[in-house]
Amino acid sequence: MRNPRNHNQVSKINLSPDVVDCIIYWTKNPKNMLKRLDELKDYQYYFQFSVTEYGKDTEPFVPHKRDEMILTFQELSCKVGTDRIIWRYDPIFINSTYTIEYHLRAYSTIAKELRGYSKKVIISLIDFHPKIKKNMDSLTITIPTDEDVIELCSHLVKIAKENDFLIEMCAEQYGIAYASCVDKALIEQLIGYEIIGKKDRNQRVDCGCVESINIGTYDTCRNGCKYCYANFNDKKVKNTSSMYDENSPLLCSRITDKVTIKERSVKSLKRH
């Protein structure tokens, strides 16, 4: 994988099951993976699956939620089990269309559909990353008051409880337990070993994630979500995606003689 800040620095990362304790997938649409899950038989893994109710103005290329994505969520849950799929309702932002009342209706509807297919829901407020400012301008977002957020969160907690979801929140202090997307306790449960990893020092102070290696690549997702900090703009994504080559060791890129390749130290964090 390339260093996103230095294109000519490339890390070689060992993905052997001997050193990979767990793989976490963040996704809005894992449909293409459903028939290939057997290829992961040597790994432990789980999914962070985002299902929201934003329209095409915000998530232009995500398939229809109720016609496709909820069904995909349910099918994936049946294949991997409820412990290995976490519902994400995020990021939450407010404007004249997506009001607090809108979010409560949408969240409640989705929660009822996903009840019994997952045990946990993670929510988060939108993070105004400088990279997405231009993409977000058309949505005319309103900054909610703390009182508005507290009211929203109190209702989300109630709805989660009514539908048998444990609810957590990413790095925000609004009376909800902190989320750990790279969840030490869940990983230990799945692999049957204690993990000796430390808190990920590259994340926010209130982030609960354990240390991990991100092997994703910026500007490669074609869902087109306006709030996504991993994509700069549609043109950049199109150009990067056009470089996809299943025989390349890099995602949507190729090795040239200009790059410096260094093998990154990767080891299991299991306590034997």
Image (tube, rainbow, N blue to C red):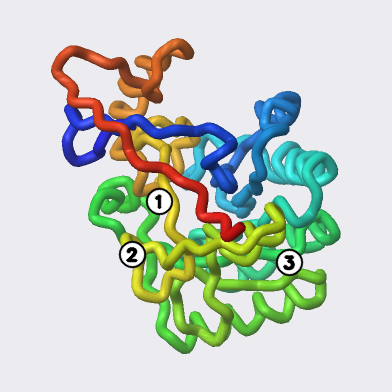
Question: In the image, residue 61 lies at what x, y percent?
Answer: 53, 34
Q: From mark 3 to mark 2, how far is it between C-alphas?
A: 35 Å
In the rendered structure, the answer to whether residue 136 lies left or right of residue 246 reads left
Labels 3, 2: front one: 2
Q: Is residue 130 visible?
A: yes
Number of the label disc, if any, that sits on residue 267: none
Rendered residue at 82%/61% (across/down): 115
In the picture of the structure, the residue carrying the numbered disc 1 is 227
In the picture of the structure, the residue carrying the numbered disc 2 is 201
Q: Tell me if mark 1 has few (under 14), some (14-19) or many (20+) residues whose alpha carbon lies within 10 angstroms of its own.
A: many
Asked which secondary structure carries label 2, the reply is loop
- Is residue 256 positioned above or below 91 on the image? above
Nearer to us in this view, 149 or 38: 38
Labels 1, 2: front one: 2
Question: In the image, residue 178 lies at what x, y percent?
Answer: 53, 75
Q: Is residue 71 visible?
A: no
- Is residue 246 positioned above or below 124 on the image? above
Specify the quadrant of the image occupied by residue 156: bottom right
Q: Earlier in the sequence, mark 3 or mark 1?
A: 3
Asked which secondary structure carries label 1, the reply is loop
Rendered residue at 75%/39% (across/down): 72
Asked which secondary structure carries label 3, the reply is helix
Amino acid type assigned to the residue bearing label 1 in the image: Tyr
Q: Earlier in the sequence, mark 1 or mark 2?
A: 2
Specify the quadrant of the image occupied by residue 207: bottom left
Q: Tell me if mark 3 has few (under 14), some (14-19) or many (20+) residues whose alpha carbon lies within 10 angstroms of its own.
A: some
Nearer to us in this view, 247 or 143: 247
